[in-house]
Image (spheres, rainbow, N blue to C red):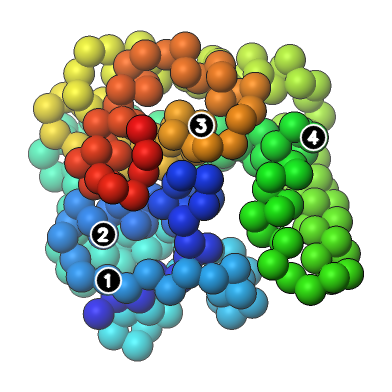
Amino acid sequence: MIKLYSFGPAFNLPDPSPFVTKIDLSLRIAGLEYESIASASNLQKAPKAKLPFIKDNNEIIADSVIILEHLKNLHGVEFDDWLSDEQAAYAQLLSKSLDENLYWTIVYSRWIKNDAWPTVKAQFFDPLPFPMNHLIASYARRSTRKQFLGHGMGKHNDQEITDIANKSWTSLSVILGDKPYFFGERICSFDITAFAMLASFTVCSLETDLGKEVKKYDNLVAFTHRISSQYYAGEIEL
């Protein structure tokens, strides 16, 4: 059985990491049997110091992109075989855009802004004994700030980051239109990535300014609710 190493459900999400959610949803859609090993301590044994990673046939595979390639090669998991070559190329580039850009707006809303940080801190660090809970939380936030700045997103002010997020959401809303999925009637790999990133705002229980912004895009909210109802019924509250 495949073992998926994750953080575990939080904030009304399958996992606070959209990259973990991407793999979790992929496994559900593919109908593969798997076990979720949920614990923040998984980071300590993660081969690339990030989650997710999986164990499959005694092989450890890390990074969501590499995991999906492994699932394709070993288990025949293929979400894009019905797309044209051009559509598959668009799906690949759009996915990377969300992974490398929109993801950092999620980080900003949770780890950098002060409104959601107390809830994030309590979720991840309050279970630790005092005073380690405060020390580790402070260290983790400083480290995240450093990564955020190094990425370049940290050079922008709040309004500029909101504008960046809105440009992504507007583009996604236009592409989706009134279709059930981004490329038509069937789900593809980009829908999985889009769900993981969008759900981090649309169904997330954290109250954030960016979360309020994305909810103005009715078709994007409906898209995440549709996938939530189909694959996470009873787990995600809508």
Q: Earlier in the sequence, mark 1 or mark 4?
A: 1
Q: Which residue is mark 1?
A: 34
* Residue 228's disc number: none
First in sequence: mark 4 vs mark 2: 2
Amino acid type at mark 1: Tyr
Find out whether the residues at labels 4 and 3 contact each other: C-beta distance under 8 Å: no
Tell which tag, 4 or 2, sits nearer the viewer. 4
Q: Amino acid at mark 4?
A: Asn
Q: Earlier in the sequence, mark 1 or mark 2?
A: 2
The quarter in which the N terminus is drawn is bottom left
In this view, 181 is above or below 41 = above
Residue 77 or 159: which is nearer the viewer? Answer: 159
Q: Earlier in the sequence, mark 1 or mark 3?
A: 1
Which badge, 4 or 3, comes first in the chain's sequence?
4
**Mark 1 → mark 2, Cα distance in angstroms:** 7 Å
Relative image position of residue 200 (x, y in whole percent): 49, 38
User: x%, y% of residue 72?
Assistant: 23, 61
**What residue sits 40% from the left and 62% below the top?**
66
Which residue does the image show at 69% across and 67% down from the upper left?
Answer: 127
Location of residue 105 by image quarter: top right
Q: Amino acid at mark 3?
A: Phe
Q: Which residue is mark 2?
A: 27
Q: Can residue 238 be seen? A: yes
Q: Quadrant of residue 67?
A: bottom left
- Image quadrant holding the C terminus, namely top left
Residue 127 vertical placement versus 164 (above, below): below
**How many C-alpha atoms fall within 10 Å of the one at disc 4: few (<14), some, or many (≥20)?**
few
Vertical relation: 111 (above or below) 160? below
Disc tally is 4
**From what the image shows, is residue 158 above or below residue 37?**
above
* Residue beneath disc 4: 114
> Is disc 1 in contact with disc 2, using a CB cutoff of under 8 Å?
yes
